[in-house]
Image (cartoon, rainbow, N blue to C red):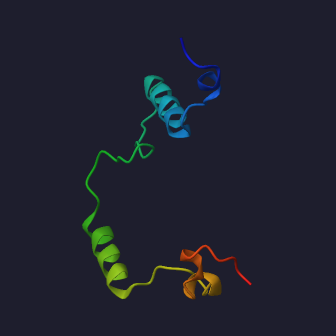
């Protein structure tokens, strides 16, 4: 027997996308699967090189400082002032 609350759980959206992509393939559409962490081909070298350069320059992060995070209070449970 399945618990009542388990009956209310919806599918993970990526599975809905995969189901739709499979349906499209069955109908003759050429699909590149990106919905479940694939693709089915190697990442081009130029993309890998650009990613390595970007990581080396540390160009990722918050677009602007968030004081209550950068002050360390976020980790103590203190609320922002």
Where 44 falls versus 25 (above or below)? below
Side of 17 relative to 67 (left or right): left
Side of 59 relative to 66 (left or right): left
Seen from the viewer's position, the closer of residues 23 and 63 is: 63
Seen from the viewer's position, the closer of residues 54 and 27 is: 54
What residue is shown at x 64% (from left), y 20% (from top)? 4
Residue reaching furthest top?
1
What residue is shown at x 59% (from left), y 82% (from top)? 73
Side of 40 relative to 81 (left or right): left
Quarter where residue 66 is shown: bottom right
- The x, y position of residue 38, in whole percent, is 35, 46
What residue is shown at x 61% (from left), y 31% (from top)? 10
Seen from the viewer's position, the closer of residues 33 and 60 is: 60
Residue reaching furthest right?
81
- The x, y position of residue 20, in whole percent, is 53, 31
What residue is shown at x 44% (from left), y 84% (from top)? 59
Where 8 falls versus 70 (above or below)? above
Where 20 falls versus 52 (above or below)? above
Quarter where residue 78 is shown: bottom right
- The x, y position of residue 58, in whole percent, is 39, 84
Quadrant of the snapshot with the C terminus: bottom right
Where 14 falls versus 3 (above or below)? below
């Amino acid at each position: 027997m399945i618990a009542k609350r388990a009956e209310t759980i919806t599918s993970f959206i990526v599975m809905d996308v995969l189901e739709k992509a499979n349906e499209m393939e069955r109908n003759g559409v050429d699909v590149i699967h990106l919905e479940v962490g694939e693709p089915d081909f190697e990442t081009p070298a130029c993309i890998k090189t650009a990613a390595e350069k970007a990581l080396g320059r540390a160009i990722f992060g918050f677009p602007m400082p968030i004081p209550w995070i950068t002050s360390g209070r976020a980790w103590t449970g203190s609320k922002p002032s």
